[in-house]
Amino acid sequence: MGGKTTGGVEIREKSIRLHFTIDGKRQRPTLMVDGRPLAPTPANIKYANRLIIEICERIRTDTFSFVEYFPASGGTGNLTVESWLNSWIATQRIEDSTRKGYAAAINFWCGAASDEVGNKIGPKSIKSLRLTHILTAIASRSYLSGKTINNYMNVLRQALALAVEEKLIPTNPALKVPKAKHQKSPPDPFSREESERIIAEALRAHAGHVHNMIEFWFWTGLRTSEILGLDWRNVDLASGSILVASTVVNGKEKDHTKTAVARTVILNSRALAAIKRQRALTQVTGGRVFHDPRHNKPWRAEDTFLHTYWERMLKRIGMRYRRPYNMRHSYATAMLMAGMTPAFCARQMGHSVEMFLSTYAKWLDGSQNEIEMARLEASLSLESPREKAKGGK
Protein backbone atom coordinates (compact mmCIF):
# COMPACT_ATOMS: atom_id res chain seq x y z
CA MET A 1 0.00 0.00 0.00
CA GLY A 2 0.97 3.67 -0.06
CA GLY A 3 1.63 6.05 -2.91
CA LYS A 4 -1.08 7.38 -5.18
CA THR A 5 -4.56 5.99 -4.66
CA THR A 6 -7.71 6.41 -6.73
CA GLY A 7 -11.34 5.75 -6.02
CA GLY A 8 -14.80 6.83 -7.01
CA VAL A 9 -18.51 6.71 -6.35
CA GLU A 10 -20.91 4.77 -8.56
CA ILE A 11 -24.55 5.89 -8.44
CA ARG A 12 -26.97 3.08 -9.13
CA GLU A 13 -30.77 3.01 -9.33
CA LYS A 14 -31.34 2.01 -5.71
CA SER A 15 -27.89 2.02 -4.17
CA ILE A 16 -24.48 3.66 -4.03
CA ARG A 17 -21.32 1.70 -4.68
CA LEU A 18 -17.75 2.78 -4.02
CA HIS A 19 -14.75 1.55 -5.96
CA PHE A 20 -11.10 1.64 -4.98
CA THR A 21 -7.99 -0.51 -5.18
CA ILE A 22 -6.13 -2.00 -2.23
CA ASP A 23 -3.25 -4.49 -2.34
CA GLY A 24 -3.67 -4.62 -6.10
CA LYS A 25 -7.27 -5.78 -5.82
CA ARG A 26 -10.27 -3.84 -7.06
CA GLN A 27 -12.94 -3.38 -4.39
CA ARG A 28 -16.56 -2.40 -5.13
CA PRO A 29 -18.49 -2.42 -1.82
CA THR A 30 -22.10 -1.23 -1.66
CA LEU A 31 -22.89 1.23 1.12
CA MET A 32 -25.29 -0.38 3.57
CA VAL A 33 -27.39 0.84 6.50
CA ASP A 34 -29.16 -1.63 8.80
CA GLY A 35 -28.64 -4.38 6.26
CA ARG A 36 -30.12 -2.42 3.37
CA PRO A 37 -28.43 -0.51 0.52
CA LEU A 38 -28.07 3.21 1.12
CA ALA A 39 -30.53 5.08 -1.13
CA PRO A 40 -28.91 7.40 -3.75
CA THR A 41 -30.36 10.65 -2.37
CA PRO A 42 -28.41 13.92 -2.86
CA ALA A 43 -27.40 13.93 0.83
CA ASN A 44 -26.24 10.30 0.70
CA ILE A 45 -24.28 10.89 -2.51
CA LYS A 46 -22.53 13.83 -0.85
CA TYR A 47 -21.70 11.58 2.09
CA ALA A 48 -20.35 8.88 -0.24
CA ASN A 49 -18.02 11.37 -1.93
CA ARG A 50 -16.61 12.45 1.41
CA LEU A 51 -16.24 8.81 2.44
CA ILE A 52 -14.26 7.76 -0.64
CA ILE A 53 -11.83 10.65 -0.08
CA GLU A 54 -11.31 9.48 3.50
CA ILE A 55 -10.85 5.85 2.45
CA CYS A 56 -8.26 6.76 -0.19
CA GLU A 57 -6.32 8.79 2.36
CA ARG A 58 -6.37 5.88 4.83
CA ILE A 59 -5.14 3.54 2.10
CA ARG A 60 -2.38 5.98 1.22
CA THR A 61 -1.19 6.13 4.86
CA ASP A 62 -1.50 2.37 5.45
CA THR A 63 -4.21 2.83 8.08
CA PHE A 64 -7.21 1.50 6.21
CA SER A 65 -9.17 -1.46 7.59
CA PHE A 66 -11.80 -2.94 5.28
CA VAL A 67 -13.79 -4.52 8.10
CA GLU A 68 -13.82 -1.22 9.99
CA TYR A 69 -15.58 0.57 7.13
CA PHE A 70 -17.64 -2.32 5.79
CA PRO A 71 -18.38 -4.70 8.71
CA ALA A 72 -21.50 -6.04 7.02
CA SER A 73 -19.35 -7.58 4.31
CA GLY A 74 -17.86 -10.01 6.79
CA GLY A 75 -14.60 -9.68 4.93
CA THR A 76 -11.26 -9.81 6.69
CA GLY A 77 -8.97 -10.11 3.72
CA ASN A 78 -7.83 -6.50 4.06
CA LEU A 79 -7.72 -6.36 7.85
CA THR A 80 -4.02 -6.35 8.70
CA VAL A 81 -2.40 -7.85 11.78
CA GLU A 82 -1.14 -4.40 12.74
CA SER A 83 -4.59 -2.85 12.48
CA TRP A 84 -6.09 -5.61 14.60
CA LEU A 85 -3.35 -5.45 17.26
CA ASN A 86 -3.91 -1.71 17.63
CA SER A 87 -7.66 -2.26 17.89
CA TRP A 88 -7.14 -5.03 20.46
CA ILE A 89 -4.88 -3.02 22.78
CA ALA A 90 -7.44 -0.21 22.78
CA THR A 91 -9.91 -2.64 24.40
CA GLN A 92 -7.60 -3.57 27.27
CA ARG A 93 -8.10 -2.18 30.78
CA ILE A 94 -4.53 -2.41 32.03
CA GLU A 95 -1.97 -0.45 34.02
CA ASP A 96 0.22 2.04 32.18
CA SER A 97 3.30 -0.10 32.83
CA THR A 98 1.55 -3.16 31.33
CA ARG A 99 0.34 -1.14 28.35
CA LYS A 100 3.93 -0.03 27.75
CA GLY A 101 5.02 -3.67 27.59
CA TYR A 102 2.17 -4.58 25.25
CA ALA A 103 3.06 -1.66 22.98
CA ALA A 104 6.66 -2.93 22.81
CA ALA A 105 5.35 -6.32 21.69
CA ILE A 106 3.15 -4.76 19.01
CA ASN A 107 6.13 -2.75 17.80
CA PHE A 108 8.08 -5.97 17.48
CA TRP A 109 5.45 -7.71 15.40
CA CYS A 110 4.59 -4.68 13.29
CA GLY A 111 7.64 -2.46 13.14
CA ALA A 112 10.78 -3.97 14.57
CA ALA A 113 10.56 -7.63 13.66
CA SER A 114 13.38 -8.11 11.18
CA ASP A 115 12.95 -5.07 8.99
CA GLU A 116 16.11 -6.07 7.15
CA VAL A 117 14.73 -9.34 5.78
CA GLY A 118 11.09 -8.37 5.52
CA ASN A 119 9.76 -10.74 8.17
CA LYS A 120 7.32 -8.35 9.81
CA ILE A 121 3.85 -9.79 10.22
CA GLY A 122 2.12 -6.44 10.83
CA PRO A 123 1.36 -5.65 7.17
CA LYS A 124 -0.01 -9.13 6.49
CA SER A 125 -3.72 -9.77 6.23
CA ILE A 126 -4.93 -11.29 9.50
CA LYS A 127 -6.74 -13.95 7.51
CA SER A 128 -3.56 -14.99 5.70
CA LEU A 129 -1.39 -15.13 8.85
CA ARG A 130 0.24 -18.55 9.24
CA LEU A 131 2.32 -20.28 11.88
CA THR A 132 5.38 -20.08 9.63
CA HIS A 133 5.10 -16.29 9.49
CA ILE A 134 5.21 -16.07 13.28
CA LEU A 135 8.06 -18.55 13.65
CA THR A 136 10.10 -16.77 10.98
CA ALA A 137 9.67 -13.41 12.71
CA ILE A 138 10.88 -14.94 15.99
CA ALA A 139 13.80 -16.78 14.39
CA SER A 140 15.02 -13.61 12.71
CA ARG A 141 15.75 -12.11 16.13
CA SER A 142 17.97 -14.83 17.59
CA TYR A 143 19.39 -12.54 20.28
CA LEU A 144 16.04 -12.11 22.05
CA SER A 145 15.79 -13.87 25.41
CA GLY A 146 13.28 -16.63 25.91
CA LYS A 147 11.40 -14.48 28.43
CA THR A 148 11.07 -11.62 25.94
CA ILE A 149 9.82 -13.96 23.21
CA ASN A 150 7.21 -15.40 25.57
CA ASN A 151 6.06 -11.91 26.52
CA TYR A 152 5.68 -10.93 22.86
CA MET A 153 3.86 -14.17 22.08
CA ASN A 154 1.47 -13.64 25.00
CA VAL A 155 0.28 -10.39 23.44
CA LEU A 156 -0.15 -11.94 20.00
CA ARG A 157 -2.04 -14.95 21.42
CA GLN A 158 -4.46 -12.73 23.33
CA ALA A 159 -5.13 -10.47 20.35
CA LEU A 160 -5.69 -13.36 17.95
CA ALA A 161 -7.89 -15.13 20.49
CA LEU A 162 -10.22 -12.12 20.40
CA ALA A 163 -10.13 -12.20 16.60
CA VAL A 164 -11.33 -15.82 16.73
CA GLU A 165 -14.11 -14.85 19.15
CA GLU A 166 -15.16 -12.07 16.76
CA LYS A 167 -15.14 -14.63 13.93
CA LEU A 168 -12.57 -12.65 11.98
CA ILE A 169 -10.36 -15.74 11.67
CA PRO A 170 -11.25 -19.44 12.15
CA THR A 171 -8.29 -20.45 14.33
CA ASN A 172 -5.46 -18.89 16.33
CA PRO A 173 -2.08 -19.81 14.76
CA ALA A 174 -0.20 -18.38 17.75
CA LEU A 175 -1.47 -21.22 19.94
CA LYS A 176 0.84 -23.61 18.12
CA VAL A 177 4.02 -21.69 18.95
CA PRO A 178 5.81 -23.49 21.81
CA LYS A 179 6.97 -21.49 24.80
CA ALA A 180 10.61 -20.48 24.57
CA LYS A 181 12.88 -21.97 27.19
CA HIS A 182 14.43 -19.59 29.64
CA GLN A 183 15.91 -19.83 33.10
CA LYS A 184 14.67 -17.32 35.61
CA SER A 185 17.53 -15.42 37.19
CA PRO A 186 17.78 -16.34 40.88
CA PRO A 187 17.66 -13.63 43.56
CA ASP A 188 21.02 -11.94 44.08
CA PRO A 189 20.81 -10.45 47.59
CA PHE A 190 23.44 -8.46 49.40
CA SER A 191 25.12 -10.28 52.25
CA ARG A 192 24.77 -8.89 55.76
CA GLU A 193 28.32 -7.52 55.55
CA GLU A 194 27.59 -5.88 52.19
CA SER A 195 24.35 -4.31 53.37
CA GLU A 196 26.06 -2.81 56.42
CA ARG A 197 28.81 -1.35 54.23
CA ILE A 198 26.21 0.29 51.96
CA ILE A 199 24.27 1.70 54.91
CA ALA A 200 27.51 3.05 56.42
CA GLU A 201 28.47 4.71 53.12
CA ALA A 202 25.00 6.25 52.85
CA LEU A 203 25.41 7.69 56.35
CA ARG A 204 28.86 9.05 55.52
CA ALA A 205 27.97 10.62 52.16
CA HIS A 206 24.22 11.26 52.34
CA ALA A 207 23.13 11.46 55.97
CA GLY A 208 19.43 12.24 56.18
CA HIS A 209 16.93 11.40 53.44
CA VAL A 210 19.03 8.92 51.44
CA HIS A 211 20.58 7.16 54.44
CA ASN A 212 17.19 6.77 56.13
CA MET A 213 15.53 5.39 53.02
CA ILE A 214 18.29 2.88 52.31
CA GLU A 215 18.34 1.50 55.85
CA PHE A 216 14.53 1.33 55.91
CA TRP A 217 14.55 -0.41 52.52
CA PHE A 218 17.10 -3.02 53.60
CA TRP A 219 15.09 -3.86 56.74
CA THR A 220 11.54 -3.88 55.36
CA GLY A 221 12.03 -5.47 51.94
CA LEU A 222 9.47 -3.21 50.26
CA ARG A 223 9.15 -3.22 46.50
CA THR A 224 10.60 -0.15 44.75
CA SER A 225 7.12 1.18 43.91
CA GLU A 226 6.03 0.66 47.52
CA ILE A 227 8.85 2.54 49.19
CA LEU A 228 8.48 5.44 46.74
CA GLY A 229 4.73 5.56 47.44
CA LEU A 230 4.83 5.14 51.24
CA ASP A 231 2.66 7.83 52.86
CA TRP A 232 2.77 9.13 56.44
CA ARG A 233 -0.96 8.38 56.74
CA ASN A 234 -0.05 4.70 56.60
CA VAL A 235 2.72 4.82 59.21
CA ASP A 236 1.86 3.84 62.79
CA LEU A 237 4.90 4.52 64.95
CA ALA A 238 3.02 3.63 68.12
CA SER A 239 2.45 0.05 67.01
CA GLY A 240 5.67 -0.09 65.01
CA SER A 241 4.04 -0.97 61.69
CA ILE A 242 3.17 0.43 58.27
CA LEU A 243 0.29 -0.23 55.90
CA VAL A 244 1.50 -0.81 52.34
CA ALA A 245 -1.45 0.37 50.27
CA SER A 246 -0.15 2.79 47.61
CA THR A 247 2.66 2.85 45.07
CA VAL A 248 4.45 5.05 42.55
CA VAL A 249 5.01 3.45 39.14
CA ASN A 250 6.74 5.33 36.31
CA GLY A 251 6.16 8.58 38.17
CA LYS A 252 2.41 7.98 38.58
CA GLU A 253 0.72 7.48 41.93
CA LYS A 254 -1.42 4.35 42.33
CA ASP A 255 -3.86 3.66 45.14
CA HIS A 256 -3.00 -0.04 45.19
CA THR A 257 -0.03 -2.38 45.36
CA LYS A 258 1.33 -4.65 42.64
CA THR A 259 -0.85 -7.51 43.91
CA ALA A 260 -3.85 -5.19 44.53
CA VAL A 261 -3.81 -6.32 48.18
CA ALA A 262 -2.81 -3.99 51.01
CA ARG A 263 -0.66 -5.50 53.75
CA THR A 264 0.68 -4.58 57.16
CA VAL A 265 4.46 -4.76 57.61
CA ILE A 266 5.75 -5.03 61.16
CA LEU A 267 8.87 -2.91 61.65
CA ASN A 268 11.97 -4.31 63.30
CA SER A 269 14.22 -2.06 65.39
CA ARG A 270 16.45 -1.06 62.44
CA ALA A 271 13.51 -0.04 60.24
CA LEU A 272 11.77 1.72 63.10
CA ALA A 273 14.88 3.73 63.94
CA ALA A 274 15.27 4.80 60.30
CA ILE A 275 11.69 6.01 59.91
CA LYS A 276 11.80 7.83 63.24
CA ARG A 277 14.82 9.75 61.98
CA GLN A 278 12.91 10.50 58.76
CA ARG A 279 9.96 11.85 60.75
CA ALA A 280 11.88 15.03 61.54
CA LEU A 281 12.48 15.63 57.83
CA THR A 282 9.10 15.06 56.16
CA GLN A 283 6.30 14.20 58.57
CA VAL A 284 5.42 17.84 59.25
CA THR A 285 4.55 18.34 55.57
CA GLY A 286 2.52 15.12 55.40
CA GLY A 287 2.34 13.15 52.20
CA ARG A 288 5.08 10.75 51.24
CA VAL A 289 7.71 9.62 53.69
CA PHE A 290 10.85 9.65 51.56
CA HIS A 291 12.02 12.67 49.55
CA ASP A 292 14.78 13.51 47.09
CA PRO A 293 17.09 15.72 49.22
CA ARG A 294 18.10 17.88 46.26
CA HIS A 295 14.76 19.69 46.28
CA ASN A 296 13.00 18.05 49.25
CA LYS A 297 10.16 16.67 47.14
CA PRO A 298 8.90 13.08 46.85
CA TRP A 299 10.80 10.73 44.55
CA ARG A 300 9.09 10.40 41.17
CA ALA A 301 10.97 7.39 39.82
CA GLU A 302 13.62 4.86 40.73
CA ASP A 303 15.98 6.11 38.02
CA THR A 304 16.61 9.39 39.83
CA PHE A 305 17.74 7.61 42.99
CA LEU A 306 19.56 4.99 40.94
CA HIS A 307 21.78 7.31 38.88
CA THR A 308 22.25 10.13 41.38
CA TYR A 309 23.04 8.10 44.49
CA TRP A 310 22.94 4.30 44.29
CA GLU A 311 25.33 3.61 41.42
CA ARG A 312 27.88 6.08 42.75
CA MET A 313 27.81 4.64 46.27
CA LEU A 314 28.47 1.09 45.12
CA LYS A 315 31.28 2.30 42.87
CA ARG A 316 32.91 4.26 45.72
CA ILE A 317 33.04 1.24 48.01
CA GLY A 318 34.10 -1.09 45.18
CA MET A 319 31.05 -3.37 45.39
CA ARG A 320 29.62 -5.46 42.58
CA TYR A 321 26.61 -3.67 41.12
CA ARG A 322 23.08 -4.86 41.84
CA ARG A 323 19.80 -3.00 41.49
CA PRO A 324 18.22 -1.35 44.54
CA TYR A 325 15.44 -3.96 44.25
CA ASN A 326 17.95 -6.47 45.58
CA MET A 327 17.58 -4.86 49.00
CA ARG A 328 14.19 -6.61 49.01
CA HIS A 329 15.87 -9.96 48.39
CA SER A 330 18.35 -9.17 51.16
CA TYR A 331 15.57 -8.75 53.71
CA ALA A 332 13.84 -11.96 52.64
CA THR A 333 17.01 -14.02 52.97
CA ALA A 334 17.94 -12.33 56.27
CA MET A 335 14.58 -13.38 57.74
CA LEU A 336 15.01 -16.97 56.56
CA MET A 337 18.55 -17.26 57.87
CA ALA A 338 17.30 -15.96 61.22
CA GLY A 339 14.95 -18.96 61.37
CA MET A 340 11.67 -17.07 60.86
CA THR A 341 8.75 -19.08 59.48
CA PRO A 342 8.12 -18.87 55.72
CA ALA A 343 4.45 -17.97 56.30
CA PHE A 344 5.37 -14.89 58.34
CA CYS A 345 8.11 -13.91 55.88
CA ALA A 346 5.71 -14.23 52.94
CA ARG A 347 3.18 -11.93 54.64
CA GLN A 348 5.87 -9.33 55.29
CA MET A 349 6.94 -9.42 51.65
CA GLY A 350 3.44 -9.46 50.13
CA HIS A 351 3.94 -12.89 48.55
CA SER A 352 1.91 -16.05 48.66
CA VAL A 353 3.71 -18.74 50.66
CA GLU A 354 4.08 -20.79 47.47
CA MET A 355 5.70 -17.90 45.60
CA PHE A 356 7.95 -17.08 48.53
CA LEU A 357 9.19 -20.65 48.88
CA SER A 358 9.78 -21.07 45.15
CA THR A 359 11.81 -17.83 45.07
CA TYR A 360 13.86 -18.28 48.23
CA ALA A 361 14.01 -22.08 48.71
CA LYS A 362 17.80 -22.00 48.36
CA TRP A 363 18.18 -19.93 51.51
CA LEU A 364 15.53 -21.86 53.39
CA ASP A 365 17.28 -25.14 52.59
CA GLY A 366 20.75 -23.78 53.18
CA SER A 367 20.02 -22.53 56.68
CA GLN A 368 18.28 -25.73 57.71
CA ASN A 369 20.44 -28.41 56.07
CA GLU A 370 22.78 -29.01 59.01
CA ILE A 371 19.93 -29.00 61.52
CA GLU A 372 17.82 -31.44 59.51
CA MET A 373 20.72 -33.81 58.84
CA ALA A 374 21.64 -33.70 62.54
CA ARG A 375 18.11 -34.80 63.37
CA LEU A 376 18.38 -37.72 60.96
CA GLU A 377 21.75 -38.77 62.32
CA ALA A 378 20.37 -38.62 65.86
CA SER A 379 17.54 -40.93 64.88
CA LEU A 380 19.94 -43.35 63.21
CA SER A 381 21.99 -43.62 66.39
CA LEU A 382 19.01 -44.86 68.37
CA GLU A 383 18.36 -48.59 68.69
CA SER A 384 15.38 -49.84 66.72
CA PRO A 385 12.54 -51.58 68.66
CA ARG A 386 13.62 -54.92 67.19
CA GLU A 387 17.18 -54.43 68.42
CA LYS A 388 15.88 -53.53 71.87
CA ALA A 389 13.75 -56.68 71.90
CA LYS A 390 16.76 -58.83 71.00
CA GLY A 391 18.79 -57.23 73.76
CA GLY A 392 16.10 -58.07 76.31
CA LYS A 393 16.22 -61.82 75.66
Image (cartoon, helix red, strand yellow):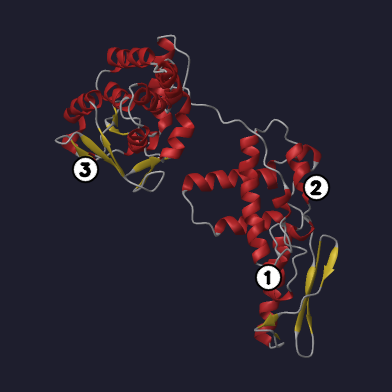
Percent x, y of residue 239: 16, 36
* Residue positioned most to the left: 238
For the C terminus, the image quarter is: top left
Look at mark 3 in the image and give the residue it sits on: 233
Q: Is residue 106 visible?
A: no
Q: Nearer the viewer, mark 2 or mark 1?
A: 2
Look at mark 1 in the image and give the residue it sits on: 69
- Left or right: residue 116 compared with residue 202: right
Look at mark 2 in the image and give the residue it sits on: 132
Q: Nearer the viewer, mark 3 or mark 2?
A: 2
Give the SS element for disc 3. helix
Percent x, y of residue 153: 65, 46
Give the SS element for disc 1. helix
Residue at x 68% of width, y 70% of height: 69
The relative height of residue 23 versus residue 219 in the rendered view (above or below) is below
Percent x, y of residue 54: 68, 67
Residue at x 80% of width, y 39% of height: 117
Crowd band around label 2 with a 10 angstrom C-alpha radius: few (<14), some (14–19), many (20+): few
